[in-house]
Image (cartoon, rainbow, N blue to C red):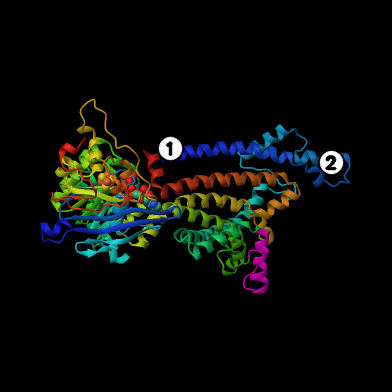
Amino acid sequence: MFVHILTRLFQSLVTMAAMAVLVFVGVFAIGNPVDLLINPEADQAEMAAAIARLGLDQPMWRQFLSFVSGLLQGNLGTSFVHNAPALGLILERMPATFELALLAMIFAIVIGVPAGLVAGLYPERLVGRGIMGASILGFSLPTFWVGLMLIMVFAVWLGWLPSTGRGETRSLFGIEFSFLTLDGLRHMFLPALNLAIFKVSLVTRLARAGTREVLLQDYVKFARAKGLSPARVIFVHVLKNMMIPVVTVIGLEFGSVMAFAVVTESIFAWPGMGKLLIESITRLDRPVIVAYLMLTVLLFVTINLIVDLVYSVFDPRVRLSESS
Amino acid sequence: MTLSQDLSSEVPVLDVRNLCTRFFTEAGVGKAVEDLSLCLRRGEILGLVGESGSGKTVAGFSLMGLIDPPGRVVSGQVLFEGVDLTALNERALRKLRGNRIAMIFQDPMMTLNPVLTIGTQMIETLRAHRRISRAEAWSRARDGLARVGIAAPEERLAAYPHQLSGGMRQRVAIAIALLNEPSLIIADEPTTALDVTIQAQILAEVQRLCRETGTALIWVTHDLAVVSGLADRIAVMYAGRLVEEGRTEAIIEQPLHPYTRGLIASVPSRNLRGERLRQIPGMTPSLMSLPEGCAFAPRCDRASEACRARAPVMETPASGRMVRCFHPLTAPEDRS
Ligand SMILES: Nc1ncnc2c1ncn2[C@@H]1O[C@H](COP(=O)(O)OP(=O)(O)OP(=O)(O)O)[C@@H](O)[C@H]1O
Ligand code: SF4
Ligand SMILES: [Mg+2]
């Protein structure tokens, strides 16, 4: 197990390095921030001074080297716009996105797994068909439209839930979180639901497919031949096997929910990383974009690692073959 | 009609009467088991023999009440210790399954749940049927593994199925079947997937255990040679029907049904060295489109007009044996 973790860590480092190159080159290619950043009225000398200050007069490879050396010291550059460390800007926004994504994934599991299980157990019945119909809707409706509908129904018409901002926050380990207060939770509900809709559909389909496949296995029939109760067969024999693919995908999806909460955060004015990214892209604030992407890569790599470990808890075959 | 009535007054463990199981699929109705009658007494071992697809597994599941849609037991009775299982509800059946009637499946690699330990899978079998503590269930499970010849049973209880070999897994499945001391075990080709030496070991052990505990056993196989040394009686199945049933020696020494004779002729050990194995010509018919009369007629060298017009029923010729054939073989000279 220990060797396994070390190997995986090393793989993760290599991935990070490769991504650093790609991200840097990619962002370099999207445009010259000078045009956007510097007052067009400025004269030649002012312009040159500004360019030099931002380090944009250096050739690309030099810029890359200074980027890498900064990276190794944990410095991802300074925002052109805010004139503050890019990493700090992002990290400041991260808890908001994190808690939102977490709640969204909880929604996805709490709704998706039971729905998928029921749909898998009764594929021919009305409930099964209904659930699948709903999941197709969840897949095909665009996030922004669902978001607007949620706001209209729950915030405007019914007036049950707030639709903008984080609400009241409370600090935990020096970080502000919304989920610690009732008001904060109420503010989280709609955006998290919006973020979750697609994932609920995904988890439902996975859980259904998994259930149907597992039901056909000999070991389920054997469990029945042993005289076990239907509850034991379903909640132990079927569920435990069906959760293996679901856990993997949920883990991986968590990364994408965090990294791409952009639309939802914009609609619900949720001050997370996604909103920051949009702002930075419109202003070509390269260091922030690069830092954001690097952080996203780090996030995915870490999640992959965790999924790998959690997976081995669920699937003894993985756990044991590695240790022997 | 049943053997036991004239042989003993004791209620047979299993008395199956005219059982029919069909699959209602889009391609048509598959008569997987048709007019199956069987009788087993305490401690008796019956070999159920037939080619692949002849309905042996379906027959086993039908007895357990484990036929799933699109299949259904359409008629007949399964009297288990005098109680008709086809009339019981699911709850009552569950009390019997794994408790009074146990089954061992065909493929040992697939029967154990990959994410649960051997111990969990054994203990749940015990606790589903009796109120005992985990600790007691655990020690019974351990003894159960030891009984089927598994070394270091304590360690095995903590193991997951993939850590065990195929032979070992099948021993575990057998141990699970024996756990609640059932009076009937249905073993569905439990050794087919294993290599020959392990097959022989398991065979001998199951036989010993059944003799010791008085458990009746139905040993399903497509290999006549396997059961001829094990079973008290043999039932031969063809295209969903029993075609012949009788004491093992009688069946082997003097088969009455042309299909049984074909099966015996294709067993390697009975052929002279150098002589080619005689295969039965033709193919197993599809259960969706069985011929009008005798299902074996297209492959039978004794087939007459009568065979093609009507289906033969199970009959008891003078010898007291049971055969489903209009022109049964009678004397050894008939074996051409
Ligand atoms: N789920 C099902 N749906 C439709 N038909 C089925 C189903 N299960 C079994 N059958 C039919 O029942 C027939 C008998 O199958 P069964 O598995 O009992 O054969 P078998 O004698 O056990 O063969 P084998 O030696 O290959 O295990 C099959 O040929 C098939 O046509
Ligand atoms: S009934 Fe006729 S066709 Fe069928 S096995 Fe007997 S002789 Fe052959
Ligand atoms: Mg079979």
State the residue at coordinates (52%, 55%).
Answer: A205
Residue B287 percent across, percent down from the top left: 37, 49
* Quadrant showing the N terminus of chain B: bottom left
Q: Is B28 situated left or right of A199 in this image? A: left
Residue A148 percent across, percent down from the top left: 68, 64
Residue A262 percent across, percent down from the top left: 66, 54
> Nearer the N terminus, badge 1 or badge 2?
1
Near-viewer residue (B48 or A163):
B48
The crowding category of the residue bearing disc 1, from other C-alpha atoms within 10 Å (few below 14, some 14 to 19, many at least 20), is: few
| Mark 1 lies on residue | A3
Residue B232 percent across, percent down from the top left: 15, 47
Can residue A291 be seen?
yes
Helix, strand, or loop for circle 2?
helix
Marks 1/2: CA distance?
Answer: 54 Å
Discs 1, 2: same chain: yes
Amino acid residing under circle 2: Met
Amino acid residing under circle 1: Val
* Above or below B316: residue A55: above
Chain name for mark 1: A
Q: Quadrant of residue B258?
A: top left
State the extent of the magenta-drawn residues as a range.
A143-166
- Mark carried by residue A61: none
The crowding category of the residue bearing disc 2, from other C-alpha atoms within 10 Å (few below 14, some 14 to 19, many at least 20), is: some
Helix, strand, or loop for circle 1?
helix
| Mark 2 lies on residue | A47
Q: How many marks?
A: 2
State the residue at coordinates (76%, 38%).
Answer: A56
